[in-house]
Amino acid sequence: MDLSSSVTEIKGVGSKKAELLEKLNIFSLNDLLAHYPRTYQDRTNIRRIRELSNGEEALISGRVLRSVLTGNPYKKPVLHILIGDGSGINLEVIFFNGKWLKDSIKIGEEYSFFGRAEIKYGKYSMLHPEYSKGDAEGSEAILPIYPLTEGLRQSDLRKWVREALKTVADDEEYLPEWLIKKYNLCAHGYALRNLHFPNDRQSFAEAKYRLIFDELLMLQLGIMIVREDESHEKGIAFSKEKSADEFVASLPYSLTGAQSRVIGEIMNDLESTKAMNRLVQGDVGSGKTAVAEIALFKAVKCGYQGAMMAPTEILAKQHFAEMKRIFEPFGINVDFLGGNLTAKERRAALARLAAGETDIIVGTHALVQPDVKFANVGLVITDEQHRFGVNQRKLLTEKGDSPNRLVMTATPIPRTLAVILYGDLDISIIDELPPGRQKVTTKAVTENGRIKAYELMRSEVKNGRQCYIVAPLIEDSESYGARSAESIYEEVKTGFSDMRVSLLHGAMKQAEKDDIMGRFASGEIDILISTVVIEVGINVPNATVMIIENSERFGLAQLHQLRGRIGRGSHKSYCVLVLGSDGEIARERAKIMCESSDGFYISEQDLKLRGPGEIFGTRQHGLPDMKLADMARHSKILAASQSAAKEIIGSDKKLEKAENSALADAVRRLFGGSLELQL
């Protein structure tokens, strides 16, 4: 038995248990050892019941004073157990469907319970705590608490992890010896043992540091290998003699300093022999589209075709209409390719593109279909690129012979995270808004404040404006405890019967969604109730109010994106955050939104509050999830691992040396066997 063996090799793991482990993405012993504890039960710190705080996870030890089953004994009765520890306060332990435990926990005997304490009206309780008696778990002072699925117990996971750890040799190592010494890392086997079953706090700290370092090192090595490949990719060099100055001079506004800086970076890329591979980040309204248009103009003037891919039909059509208007005076032919074209229209558009009659093609993911052929594509641009699947950017790039690539996003990402997420891209940031951009007044209210928000909405509609209401759910859910778009739609449709109200959500067909957004953009709808499907929408300058229900259910970066749908015209705009929870974190997040309109600051705060996985799901970018590493909290380890990765790649660009063979295998495992990251 080794780390690649199936978990069924462990005694006690049959087919049924293996099915439960699969729900946790555990298939092999390696997977099992990478299923890290979410917290720990410190047996050296038994708390007195009287000392417990509300919401605290703690270990208590006491005698069972009473055990009672309530409810229908044949229909999942509830077991209530009263525990006393001599502190003067008793604790009620509650197990739903607890009939099977009634005879296991005996009155008069001593047990330990680990769980979250709840204190209400002077009564102390724990719901479904972990429990043990005597030394059934072994002699460890600190026990791991693992994420579980129904049907698995902590004792099961602990027993199986102990078995898996027996296959890890003390001297087993995949990092080069020089690196371990230079960065003062503990051995890998020691790290695994002390992360699961720490000897003490110092051993745990050493183990966690090593495994976080490993995660960040592997991630950066994988990205650097891809980047090294692309850095030597010979691209299309645009002529330095052909400029976009005449187009810039025709614009009815002056470029901001940030736009000019980013355009300079793009032009340097376009005129070099290396294929451009650049990300442009810019807050909502910062002028990314103008930057893209200038780059496309340069491509056409240099004799090449350009392509721009947008995530929705309606956004692509908006880009198409605008580019057709501004480029036609220069004799530039702009065409459109989307899913709603008739077969005849599509064939004609494809023929024009293949013949070179089309200079710039704008479209949706329809651009990456196999039958789309370019005559001479030199620049491909992906707008709101995080909305696409992991392969679509690559498929668009493959339509030509190493065309220059530009990807744009209005989702501000902290630079530390952007370097990780987009390690294969050069990064440009437009961190300045054009003058005259309206600042949105943002206010947070509780449920009681909704009436005033509705009054504001009615007033704005009567003045000819339009409004959004955003909900986290499509339909009501008992388990989720939040308002749904459908229930709000029924409420608003009744209360605002004199106004034009419509509903939009992601479960609708694309054609229906496009129709509703088109009618809202043209002013045919006064109030649009929607889910986050409008996060990346079209420009509706007449929309001045956005009410976001259960705003605590959204990340800060997402709230900022939603708020960016309003304040796009000359009218004063308002965003109302309706809090369904009055918790401390919910209030802190609402305070950040009310005080700041800086997307990069907001995303930094989001990263601190929620971590990188939620702010910008790495899974969709082809990057592996981090189990332990947090770029916000582990910045020092990140810096150290970056230095180590650069040293390794500096002397072995493909990890081909014998001393790096085990390291190369570990990197491949992290990336699912392939180093072809497609961001």
Image: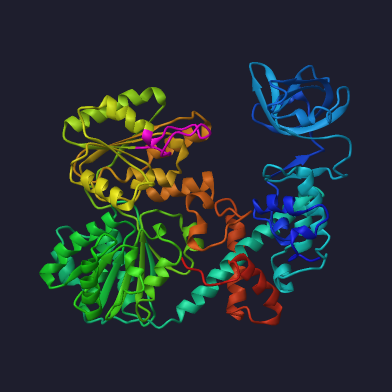
User: In percent of the image, x 39 and y 53: which residue is there?
Assistant: 411
Q: Residue at x 68, y 77 (%)?
A: 661
Nearest the eye: 161 or 102: 102
| Residue at point 49%, 28% (across, down) | 582
Please indicate whether residue 487 sits to the left or right of residue 610 in the image.
left
- For this view, does 536 lie left or right of residue 157? left
Furthest toward the front, the residue is 74
Q: Residue lying farthest left? A: 329
Against 518, residue 638 (above or below) is below
Describe residue 541's horizontal placement relative to residue 117 as left or right.
left
Q: Main secondary structure of the magenta part?
A: loop
Q: Quadrant of the N terminus?
A: bottom right
Query: Which region is colored magenta?
Result: 470-486
Is residue 287 visible in this depiction of the protein?
Answer: no
The quadrant holding residue 432 is bottom left
Q: Is residue 555 above or below residue 443?
A: below
Task: Give the percent coordinates (x, y) of residue 145.
Answer: 73, 43
Residue 21 in view of the camera: yes
- Residue 409: image quadrant is bottom left
- Judge whether residue 675 is colored magenta: no
Question: Which color scheme is applied?
Answer: rainbow
Q: Is residue 609 above or below residue 109?
A: below
Q: Give how far across and how far down residue 122 sits, in percent.
A: 67, 16
Q: Nearer the viewer, residue 245 or 37?
A: 37
Residue at 35%, 54% in the rendered image: 410
Q: Tell me where residue 36 appears, x and y as whole percent.
A: 69, 52
